[in-house]
Each structure stands twice: as structure tokens, then as C-alpha cells.
Image (tube, coloured by chain):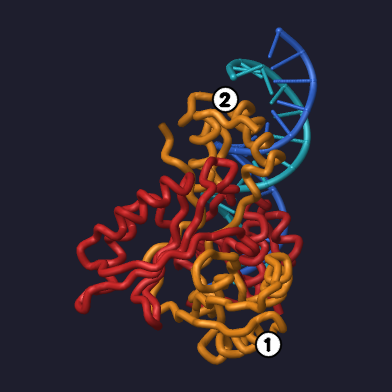
Chain colours: A red, B orange, C blue, D cyan
Amino acid sequence: MQIDEVDQRIIALLVADARSSYADIGARVSLSAPAVKRRVDRLRSAGVIRGFTAVVDPAAVGWNTEAFVELFCTGRTTPAQIAVATRRHPEVVGSYTVSGEADALVHLRAADIGHLEQALERLRAEPFVTSTRSMIVLSRLVESPTVVPAPG
Amino acid sequence: MQIDEVDQRIIALLVADARSSYADIGARVSLSAPAVKRRVDRLRSAGVIRGFTAVVDPAAVGWNTEAFVELFCTGRTTPAQIAVATRRHPEVVGSYTVSGEADALVHLRAADIGHLEQALERLRAEPFVTSTRSMIVLSRLVESPTVVPAPG
DNA sequence: CTTGAAATTTCGATAAG
DNA sequence: CTTATCGAAATTTCAAG
């Protein structure tokens, strides 16, 4: 799909504030509200824009503990297997296959250390997991929800 | 601040779709639209809801390469130092101090391997960085923008 | 094929109960 | 918190570039 500079600016504006009106966006990109809506609809159906979400402070809803866990897997483990296995756990907020020593990196978010330990235990129980190495997050320094290239 | 079950359900609905109307949300939580708006306003000013954003497919906007980099730092490096240093780089989408071997974990997103290498080089040039260990993301299996505890 | 303008419907914000 | 109201925004339709 083709994305022009106007689309990029619209995307950037929606990332900054998903609730801004089409008229507001239109004013900034020199287009009418319906024209903006059509572009947004097109971007949505093309999958460029996956959706709109609220950014929530995890601590405020009681999720105070976070960790990144490196997974070491048995020889013939497929990414698909890791995907379905990690997706099962509600504590998993991110999961990636990676190059390097480990086979996968899993981002966990839990209520507290006890909850985290329990989630980790469940992860380790997956049949293809041979071992894990955990990094507990001490403080979150940066966390951008999404990133778009700078307009221009 | 106090968050009740209704607030939690409202948050969950907004995470699922930040553009749903107050009336729609109200219908699902058995409240009127103004009542929902008041709660959302309260949650926003309390910082529980940080904002609303569009979820964008990074690949669709030309960011095809991703990596997690472990930072090893000199003895007296503070989290604040790491924060300001990592925040400077536009490729950094996440940055955390962690327990374990490394001192920090940095999540990078770049256009391609060349761009990633360049960003990594800039990171390694930070005075307090003694060494790094990179995990290049081969495939993204799970990536939830945010997570809220299951309602109920 | 995309835009802009007008018309209709829906939504948001506020006041009152 | 709810109902009611007014102004604004979204959405559809349609005509024009």
C-alpha cells in the first residue's frame, strides 16, 4: 500500500492523540474532515493503523512488577510454538524470537513479585523451554507506545 | 486514588478501542454517557489513563528492524543518566534498568539493519556504557500495547 | 480517483433535577 | 447518577476538479 506524506502526518497526529477530531487533523494537514476520515479508514483497512487504544499506567491498575525473560528452547522449537505458548499467559505483554544466545525474549507484567514468579513458573513449564534467564525491571525509563518517522 | 470495578471495565474497553463513544461504554457498564465521561475525566486527571494513541504497524511506516540491547555501565551510573541518554535517541522505544548481569535493557526500532547499527553505535558512544549485548528481533510474536486486569 | 460542501445523524459537554 | 438540552463532531451523500 502507498503512504504519502499527508498520511504520515495524519498517523503521527493520531499517535499523539487518538481522540483528536478529523476537523482538527484536517486543519493541520490542510484537508477537510471527510478527506481525513477517508484516509484514516483506508489506513485502518490496510492494517497500517491497527486500532486505537488508551495508554494506561500499569501501576495505577495494580501491575507493579515487570520483567524480561530470555527463553532457551529445545532444538526443534518453531516460532509458532513459542507464539501460541506465550500468548496463553495473560502476563505476557510482548514476545519475540531473537538472535543471540537466547531463542526468545518475553516481556512480562505482573501484580507483584509473587505473581511474577508464578507466571515465570508457568512459562518454564512449557515443554520446549529448557531454561530461562530473567531480568527484573527496576525502573521504566522510556516507554513509547508506538513510533512513527518524523514528518518531513 | 480509588478505582472500582466499573472503572476497570471502562479502562479495559478504552484499551480495546479508544474511540468508542461514552454511550457505547455506558451501555456495557450500565451507566449513562455523562457518568462514563466523568469517570474517564477523573481517570485521566489522576494519571491512570495517560492518553489515547493509535496503534501503528511499524513495518507499514518503514521501521522494519527491531532489537533489544543490554547495556553494561560503569560503576557509578545512575538510572537518571541512563534515562536522559537513551531518551535522546529516536530509535529507543523502551528503556529499563534491570536486575541481572546487565544494568539496563533498551528496546530499539529502526528502519533497517544499517539504521540499527548506526543507532547502536551512538548508544555505545555514551560515556558510561562499557559494553553492550544485542538481541535482534527475528519475529514479533506478541505485542500488547497495554494490559489491564481481567474484569471481575 | 480524490476532494470539498451540504445534509443528516450521532456524540460530547453542560445544566438541572 | 440520570435525564434533557444545545452545540459540535462524525458520517453519508453528492457535486466538482
In the rendered image, residue B39, in percent from the top left (x then y), is placed at 63, 31
- For badge 2, the amino acid type reads Ser
Mark 2 vs 1, N-terminal side:
2
Q: Nearer the viewer, residue A146 or A67?
A: A67
Q: Position of residue B58 (x, y in %)?
A: 51, 72
Camera-nearest residue between B19 and A36 = B19
In the picture provided, is B26 more to the left or to the right than A8?
left
Host chain of mark 2:
B
Tag 1 residue: B125
Chain of residue at mark 1: B
Q: Position of residue A87 (x, y in %)?
A: 33, 57
The residue under label 2 is: B32
Q: CA distance from mark 2 to mark 1?
A: 55 Å
| Between marks 2 and 1 in the image, the one whose residue lies nearer the viewer | 1
Quick one: label 2, few (<14), some, or many (20+) residues within 10 Å? some
Determine the residue positioned at 37% across, 74% down.
A97
Q: Amino acid at mark 1?
A: Ala
Q: Residue at x 56, y 61 (%)?
A: A40
Helix, strand, or loop for circle 2? loop
Residue B126 falls left or right of residue B11: right
Residue B87 visible in image = no
Foreground pick, A84 / C4? A84
Residue B79 shows which numbered tag? none
Q: Left or right: where does residue B89 sit relative to residue D1?
A: right
